[in-house]
Amino acid sequence: MNTKLSPLLLAVLASAALAQASAPKGVPIQPLEAYDVSKLPDDHYGRLARYGKELTDRTFAHIGPQAKNPAMRYAGNNLACSSCHQASATKAFAMPWVGVHSSFPQYRAREDEVSTVEERINGCMERSMAGKPLPLDSTEMKAFMTYIHFLSKDVPTGAKVEGQGLPPFKAPNRRADTVAGGQVYAAKCAVCHGTEGQGLRTGAPGEGYTFPPLWGADSFNNGAGMGRLLFASAFIKTNMPLGAQHGQPQLSDDEAYDVAAFMLSHPRPQKANLERDFPARWNKPVDAAFPPYVDGAPADQHKFGPFAPLQENMKQLKDSLLKASGR
């Protein structure tokens, strides 16, 4: 048997190896000290960036429902942006803002539109913060934008950031078990978030939380990403309980899935007009548990699973939905 490789094949293999070696790698998120806004000059940019970080960590104090100036009460709860975007939005796989400025404008399936960073911020204001949009020309919007720009300063436009967003989560192929989730919650979550999900306040009402409430009037509404079971499971598996991080989980997939379902089985603020979300219905995540549903499955399955049959069904429906839309 002739085992010699032809010159052409050798050239192809060499070219492929070179391409793989030179392929751009993801930009790593730096240690927290690399994002120290206190080291910025005392100029307009530096002051806005510092205020942006302050807004991220103490959202409730400046634009929360009990802010001193009633005209500044844009958020509908006393959470902070960093309640979810941990470590002042710099923790890998906790939805960091590192690189966000470099990735927008971008197509957003929820709106079926190309959106700006400002629109993305206001999406969080209306959902995770259960409030209303910030004016685009407000100092607060400019501060958020400046802080996001600062966190993205070393990320080239269009570059991939290692640890951006959340890691994939493969859900167990079953309906989530809220009873088992309640047991996980009591054993591993209640010590921080309270036996009734009420969180641990930092001080008096209006002064925010050391650990945020997970349901009830002062939590995120049902239009937030965290209101979807697969999304919440991915966040919990990677970041909860306190001290967990990517690659060092403290919960199994089953535990994260069930405890997320337990959390979402409780009442929370309701967002109006959710039927307007995902107008291109083929983009709607199967765990977006609000109507309209186009696949014939019951609402309970969209909330608690199993999701694999729904995902497969949506793949089959996509072509007919596209055709019906005239695309």
Image (cartoon, rainbow, N blue to C red):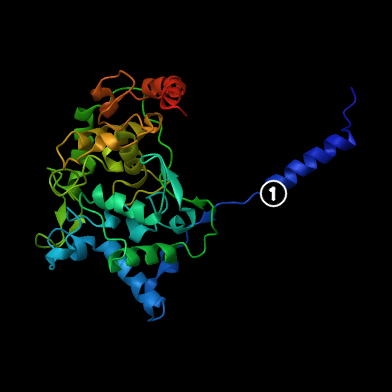
Provide residue 323's location: percent of width, then percent of height: 45, 23
Q: Which residue was labeled with disc 1?
A: 21
Q: Compare residues 15 and 49 and report the one nearer the observer.
A: 49
In-image side of 174 versus 200 (left or right): right
In-image side of 323 versus 228 (left or right): right
Q: Compare residues 259 and 315 and report the one nearer the observer.
A: 315
Above or below for 149 versus 45:
above
**Residue farthest bottom in this picture:** 42
- Residue 53, by quadrant, is bottom left
State the residue at coordinates (30%, 70%).
51
- Residue 266, by quadrant, is top left
State the residue at coordinates (45%, 52%).
105
Residue 247 visible from this viewpoint: no
Residue type beneath disc 1 = Ala
Provide residue 253's location: percent of width, then percent of height: 36, 33
Q: Compare residues 176 and 314 and report the one nearer the observer.
A: 314
Provide residue 18's location: percent of width, then percent of height: 74, 47
State the residue at coordinates (73%, 43%).
17
Residue 125 visible from this viewpoint: yes
- Residue 7, by quadrant, is top right
Q: Secondary structure at mark 1?
A: helix
**Badge 1, how many Cα within 10 Å: few under 14, some, many 20+?**
few
